[in-house]
Amino acid sequence: MSYSIGEAAKMVGLTAHTLRFYDKEGLLPFVKKTSSGLRAFTESDIEWLKIIECLKGTGLPLKQIKQYIDWCMEGDATIPQRLNMFIEQKKHVEEQKAKWEKHLEKINFKIKYYEDAAQHGNLNVFERNPKLLEEKKRLFKD
Amino acid sequence: MSYSIGEAAKMVGLTAHTLRFYDKEGLLPFVKKTSSGLRAFTESDIEWLKIIECLKGTGLPLKQIKQYIDWCMEGDATIPQRLNMFIEQKKHVEEQKAKWEKHLEKINFKIKYYEDAAQHGNLNVFERNPKLLEEKKRLFKD
DNA sequence: TTAATCTTTAGAGTTAGCTCTAAGTCAAGA
DNA sequence: TCTTGACTTAGAGCTAACTCTAAAGATTAA
């Protein structure tokens, strides 16, 4: 059993256009075609798409994803490179998470700030709540 | 005391080009110029840049950041919109964090997979470790 | 069998966010 | 004063990742 490009697209939340674009970029060398030239996505291909989505979703550019796919096609000799790539990507994800945590603190501060402002209809927040000013200084010092 | 565009750029980790681009896009209406036409960034302007960086870093497009800046320039009447924007952005950040968590699970699985493969020099990982196959099924089922 | 709805390709167009260039102006140190 | 480097503008160019179009061929349901 296999899926058409439209079905595959639906399954992974992309468009058929995007899948063709990925194919053109060399990201889908594993997808075979029927005798009449239509792409036929297997279950295994869908799994490939999911790992591509995972890497893309964590910010890896398509070029580097292609690099990974190429390594996979080359066989066992590239296992160390692939392992290394995932280790690097894990680092990257953890750095990003830390960054987002810091951003979230600023956003939470702004929510507190504007909640007070909304309640009183003006922006004299720090006069009413000096502690919030301290928090602001702490959050924006670096 | 105020900073030149180059100094300001360094302070927030952007280039002067980028700051000029932001200005052109209407993101920096608060930055004043000297009599000879040079931009002079105040401490308060630097804080604006940091909040812009925060919003950009959490994935808010420049157009929506401009919308926020415009609201700030309009005065107290837009406080509810601004509060709402930060609440929405907080939601967005938390959704993203959850997504990254899922991606990280897949990446951790791949690391385990390739660690075993690297150790044995081939990809017969699931024959050696059937539990990993179960984990794969769980991670890629959706 | 026919109509509707896929799918194919090559290639053009779009969007976001920079990034750089040219030609000139301004500021600060020797 | 001279020189060096930073600044100004308008506008062109670039990259990533799509997104769409046209014209033709394949598949499917009635």
Image (tube, coloured by chain):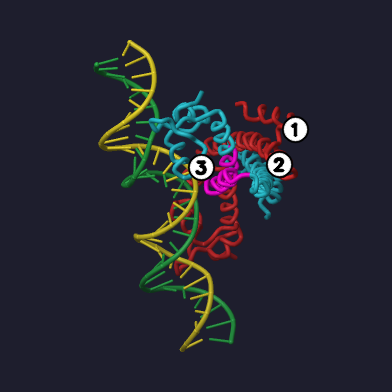
Chain colours: A cyan, B red, C green, D yellow
Where does label 2 land, which residue? B117
Q: Distance between the residues labelled 1 and 2?
A: 11 Å
Residue visible at 69% across and 36% down in the picture: B124
Measured as percent of width and height from the top left, residue A133 is found at: 68, 47
Question: What type is the residue that disc 2 sits on?
Answer: Ala
In this picture, is A17 found above or below D7?
A: above
Mark 2 Cα-neighbour bin, 10 Å: few <14, some 14–19, many ≥20: many
Measured as percent of width and height from the top left, residue A123 is found at: 59, 43
Which range of residues does the magenta coloring cover?
A54-75
Mark 1 Cα-neighbour bin, 10 Å: few <14, some 14–19, many ≥20: few
Quadrant in which residue C4 is drawn: top left
Where does label 3 land, which residue? A27
**Residue B85 included in the magenta stretch of the image:** no
Q: Find residue B129 and name its label.
A: 1
- Chain to which the residue tagged by mark 1 belongs: B
Measured as percent of width and height from the top left, residue B121 is found at: 71, 45
- Chain to which the residue tagged by mark 2 belongs: B
Q: Which of B60 and A33 is in front in this view?
A: A33
Asked whether disc 1 touches disc 2, contact meaning CB atoms under 8 Å apart, the reply is: no
Residue visible at 54% across and 39% down in the picture: B82
Measured as percent of width and height from the top left, residue B127 is found at: 72, 32
Query: Can you tell which of label 1 and label 3 is closer to the viewer?
Result: 1
Question: What type is the residue that disc 3 sits on?
Answer: Leu
**What SS does tag 2 mark?**
helix
